[in-house]
Image (cartoon, rainbow, N blue to C red):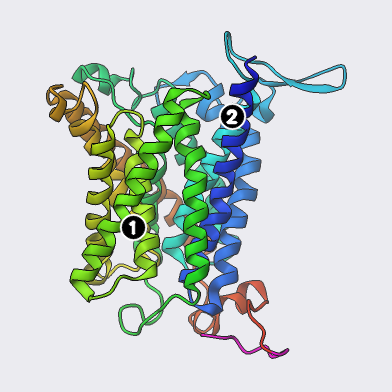
Amino acid sequence: MDSGNAAWMLMAAAMVFLMTPGLAFFYGGMVRAKAVLNMLMMSAVAIAITGMVWTLWGWSIAYAGQDLAGIFGDPVRGFLLHDTVTADQGVFTSISAAHASYPRTMDIAFQMAFAMIAVALISGALAERVKISTWMLFVALWITLDYAPMAHMVWNHGLLSEDGIISQAIGAPVHDFAGGTVIHINSAVSALIIVLIVGDRVCFNKHPMRPHNLPMTMLGAFLLWFGWFGFNSGSALAANGTAGYTWLSTTIAACAAIMGWLLTEKIRSGHYSALGAASGMISGLVAITPSADVVSPFWSMVIGLLAGCICCFACGLKLRLNYDDSLDVVGIHGVGGLLGTILVGFFAVGTGLFSGGGFRQLLVQIIVALVAMLYAAAVTAIIAFALEKTIGWRVADKDEISGIDQADQGESAYEFFGSSKLIGQ
């Protein structure tokens, strides 16, 4: 075991775990005061349910089990982590893969944190109107049937991996360094499908629904940026030069995206908003994720600028197309993830179109992204329809109007001199 690599992977896992609480703050500040506790609870539930499902069978489906049709692994082989965790004289240890530089338990922890943030991202599209009980069941089903198989397909020699059928047929290995398809495209497409099934909030696109606490949102955005260093640099799976470079490319893209979003916003509305800075930051982090290890500093900056500008425009589409993606999961994570995945085909060193690599890298990136979108849409539609027809997704309209925090949690986020009246409803 290499103690340096082991220490880094433990730290990276902790940083990725921090992203879900960071997301809770990011989303929590953007909802109205009467729904902030419900928003925070959705992230808490995502952590709790995912942690249990991943331990029971999620890890096995994604990474431990024998490959089945290139789509998922055997859920039994790694059930309750018995393929990896053993007790030796009362001390729990890990069965490491041959020549591994750190114990396998660190992989389990790292990938568990990825699964947590992936499903938590979806909650932003459903803000202010979804029952926690339905969300609990959704998280368990989505991790089992969507996320774990998608991780297997892309990162464990499955259908969408660099040595999978699609890559072999085109003659170029798909590149998704840290989750453009598995995390961002997957979560955003799933979010859109649920939004179309669940429907809009009461008075959506009729009355303003302003964020109640932008400092909270900014705090969440900065926590997400910090966690993203574990997300991207940790995906090097070692404390090495790749980890160091991805730290830089990740930061460069996020900085450029902030400016791209703010300049676009200034032209459109005449203001540089704090919400725009936070949103631009996340859009750049999303877009650089698939290519953080294979694009130069210049192209990292270009990716960030493009993400900031394009995602800013994309977030306005929900008002024109009239779908209530409450906190812009589709506009930021969907568009940013798809953009970043495709731009690998243009900018990747040695294989990208702009570096003399030809069209094959671009083609494989597009096809794999489309297949990932179709899989996420199909599986999520089945889960969401089943839940809608059985226990239902939404709270009653009157509870949404009066405040989902009181209806679903029986609590209020803010008290003023002992009063139960909500501030900023």
Q: Position of residue 191 (x, y in %)?
A: 39, 55
Q: Is residue 277 visible?
A: yes
- In the image, which residues are magenta? 417-425
Which residue occupies the extreme top position in the image? 98
Which residue is painted at 33% across and 27% down in the image? 160
* Residue carrying label 1: 280
**CA–CA distance in space, label 2 to label 1:** 28 Å
Query: Dot 1: what SS?
Result: helix
Say left or right for 55 vs 278: right
Q: Is residue 65 above or below residue 31?
A: above
Query: Dot 2: what SS?
Result: helix
Q: Position of residue 330 (x, y in %)?
A: 33, 56
For the N terminus, the image quarter is top right
Which residue is painted at 44% across and 36% down in the image? 232
Q: Amino acid at mark 1?
A: Gly
Q: Are marks 2 and 1 in contact (CB under 8 Å)?
A: no
Dot 1 alpha-carbon crowd within 10 angstroms: few under 14, some 14 to 19, many 20 or more: many
* Residue carrying label 2: 8
